[in-house]
Image: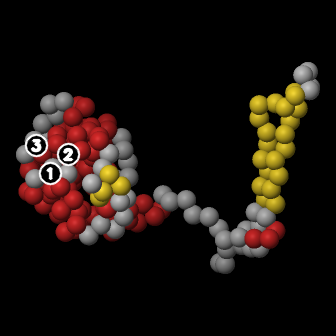
Amino acid sequence: MKFKICGDLEAPDWVLAEIAQLADMSQKDVIILVSTVMEVFPSYSFDTVESILLDKNFPLESKSDTKGSFAVLRYIVVNAVKYEVEETLLVNELEQMGLKRSHCSAIIGPFRRYQGEIRKKLEENTLQLSKLDNERDIFWQVKETLDCQHMSKADAGILEVRLPIKKADR
């Protein structure tokens, strides 16, 4: 089954496995975990997350389970923003993946609050290229090097590219 939250592809196996793990948590724990994901975004340092969770009295029974739950919640939130998934569709897709409705509601609240902020941070971290001044003036060439001892082609070459870039208006 294809999901918009997965870029209109099938959900990765690890996501389905971690969602099953999330389903076994209490709603309170899911709320704590998802709010922590939102607080530390875009950071992905588990040490930071672990210290915040300990401050919130989150039961860290297994580090690997908590890391997996954190990773899947981060995946859900980032992809929901990235693919502009509406809240109702997000809830439906998460339920189809095996998450309880109460857990979906626990995710939607913080998602709604932090959605704009996450979008802004994702845009800041996106590579943006300047516009080309004149596409016809693009120059490129590949230079091959020869191995002098054997007079054969070496394993590596050099790629040279020159792009005429418009200067930014200030």
- Category of crowding for the residue at label 3, using alpha-carbon neighbours closer than 10 angstroms: few (below 14), some (14–19), many (at least 20): few
Between the C-alphas of marks 2 and 3, the distance is: 10 Å
Q: Residue at x 26, y 70 (%)?
A: 86
- Category of crowding for the residue at label 2, using alpha-carbon neighbours closer than 10 angstroms: few (below 14), some (14–19), many (at least 20): many
Dot 3 amino acid type = Met
Q: Which mark is nearer the camera, 2 or 3?
A: 2
- Say which label, 2 or 1, has the lower sequence index: 2
Residue 42, given in percent of the width and then of the height, sits at: 38, 52
- Say which label, 2 or 3, has the lower sequence index: 2
In this view of the protein, can residue 59 be seen by the observer? yes
Dot 1 amino acid type = Leu
Q: Quadrant of residue 78?
A: bottom left
Residue 56, given in percent of the width and then of the height, sits at: 15, 44
- Say which label, 1 or 3, has the lower sequence index: 3
Between the C-alphas of marks 1 and 3, the distance is: 10 Å
* Side of 80 relative to 150 (left or right): left
Instruction: Please determine whether, in this image, residue 106 is positioned above or below residue 153.
Output: below
Question: Which element type, helix, strand or loop, lies under badge 2?
Answer: helix
The residue under label 3 is 25
Q: Which mark is nearer the camera, 1 or 3?
A: 1
The residue under label 2 is 19
Dot 2 amino acid type = Ile
Q: Residue at x 10, y 41 (%)?
A: 24
Q: Residue at x 80, y 71 (%)?
A: 136
Q: Please tell me the numbered disc located at residue 99.
A: 1
Between the C-alphas of marks 2 and 1, the distance is: 6 Å
Question: Which is nearer the eye, 151 or 160?
Answer: 151
Question: Which element type, helix, strand or loop, lies under badge 1?
Answer: loop
